[in-house]
Image: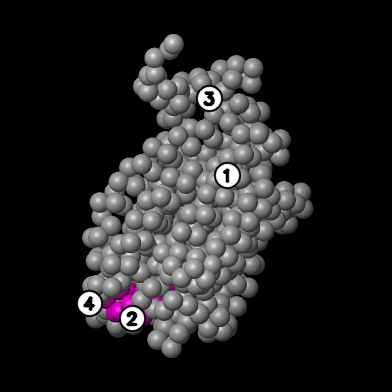
Amino acid sequence: MRKFNPLLLLHRFVSTQHMIKPKNRIGDIPSNKEAYGNSLKIAAPAVVEMVGMALMALVDMMMVGRIGAHAVAAIGLTNQPRMIFFSFFFALNIAVTAIVARSKGAGDLDGARSCLRQALSVGVIVGLILTVLAVIFARPMMQFSGAQYDTIEPATDFFRISGYGIMFAVLSQIICAAQRAVGNTKITMQVNLVANIVKVLFNFLLIGGYLGFPALGVSGAGVSMVIANVVSFVLAGASLLQKDSILGFASKDRWKPEIIMLKRLWQITSGALVEQVGLRIGFFAFALVIAGLGTNDFAAHQIGMQVMNITFTFADGIAIAATALVGQSLGMKRLDLSVMYGKIGLRLALGISAILCLGVFLTRNHFPMLITSDELIVQTASGLLVIMIFILPILMSQVVLGGTLRGAGDTKFVAITMIISVGVLRPLCGFIFTYTIGLGLAGAWIAIIVDQSARLLMLFVRFTRGKWLLT
């Protein structure tokens, strides 16, 4: 009888040579050092970028939190309507990443640049339309979002003001999506970190009114967001003007509509858009469930979500690497490497989630006090962080699997998964656990576990069956 050896099992689990069966190999399988190095080379800057942005958002909330719980809740109420506005561009960015990555893998750099040009043209048109809608319909949207008497005015002001920066934000995101697809995550890291530092600086100056600047409160946070969006667009655009940029534009480039490329973009965008709309509607409905609990519970929920956003960024960074490497591998006709990089992403996600769970547990009673001094809100938020420990490994795994499938262009299946889990399960279970069973805010967070688990199961089955390799 063979003796159980946990170290041997761990070695087999992380070894690239055991990820692909010999009969499925198309060519040589890279060593652990090379394969993990390729993933981390893209993932590390992306993680730094995402974590930095999340930390800046945390600093924002700390600044706003000094105004009061109603201010935290007011900005929180704008999150889901704003995300609904950005749904189309999130979907478009997924298409840009998938097409540019596959084009790079196939050596078709002209196709990659064509994709970016067409996406930017679409971004200008749709971005202007959404800016007008955000400015005109800010108040009705905040009322529909569940804003109460103490949050309706600041929420409306913040949403209307921040709406002026929508087009700059989406154009910057499109450029960054293309840069990530070719592996230039250092550029996107620099763009977003600088923009967020600018945002925090102007938040400091405009929320409380320092160094001669007016004290605008929540409205100041909106102005800061617009300034940051403009800065990110300028920096992202400048990255295309560098001499060594493989995505750079030339005077001979065509900016007229290219039907074939637009069809390719729409083919992937349409599936991702269904996902984004279902996702945002689900999140919106879930936010309404929590908003019904009152300002204090909603503020505690926002604190918990800030922590989740920070942890999510680690998964998102790994998923970006998986999307890029899977797309590039498919462009080279190496289906085996696509599977390998998907599995590497999963292993990185599980390892990092274990460390994050420990960090959340150790700081669960201290973190909320950085944002508010209200003892009831602090106590409630601390309880949510305990629940989060059970969410993190599931969340990180499903995010990476979703990124892997998107890299192959399998956006329709991911869309179906998101609609079922986020659009249906999360708000439905949230309402049942929160109100019918009477678990309150804790019940809503238990619903998140149900949502994440269902999503992970569906994505894992899809990944292991391999159908996504043929999309």
* Image coordinates for residue 304, horizontal then vertical, percent: 37, 62
> What residue is shown at x 38% (from left), y 37% (from top)?
351
Asked if 424 appears above or below 165 in the picture, the reply is above
Cα separation, mark 3 vs mark 4, equals 58 Å
Q: Residue furthest right?
A: 259
Checking the image for residue 457, the label placed there is 1
Who comes first in sequence, dot 1 or dot 3? 3
Is 70 in the magenta?
Answer: yes
Label 4 Cα crowd, 10 Å radius (few <14 / some 14-19 / many 20+): few
Who comes first in sequence, dot 4 or dot 2? 4
Name the residue that disc number 2 marks. 217
Residue closer to the observer: 216 or 259: 216
Left or right side of 153 for 69: left
> What residue is shown at x 52% (from left), y 77% (from top)?
145
Q: Amino acid at mark 3?
A: Met
Checking the image for residue 211, the label placed there is 4
Q: Amino acid at mark 2?
A: Gly
Label 2 Cα crowd, 10 Å radius (few <14 / some 14-19 / many 20+): many
- Quadrant in which residue 349 is drawn: top left
Q: Amino acid at mark 1?
A: Leu
Q: Amino acid at mark 4?
A: Leu
Quadrant of the image for the N terminus? top left
Who comes first in sequence, dot 3 or dot 4? 3
Asked if 122 appears above or below 67 in the picture, the reply is above
**Dot 4 lies on which element?**
loop
Checking the image for residue 129, the label placed there is none
Cα separation, mark 2 vs mark 3, equals 53 Å
Query: Do residues under tags 1 and 3 come within 8 Å of each other at their CB atoms?
Result: no
Label 3 Cα crowd, 10 Å radius (few <14 / some 14-19 / many 20+): some
- Examine the residues drawn in magenta and state their main secondary structure: helix
Say which of marks 2 and 3 sits in front.
3
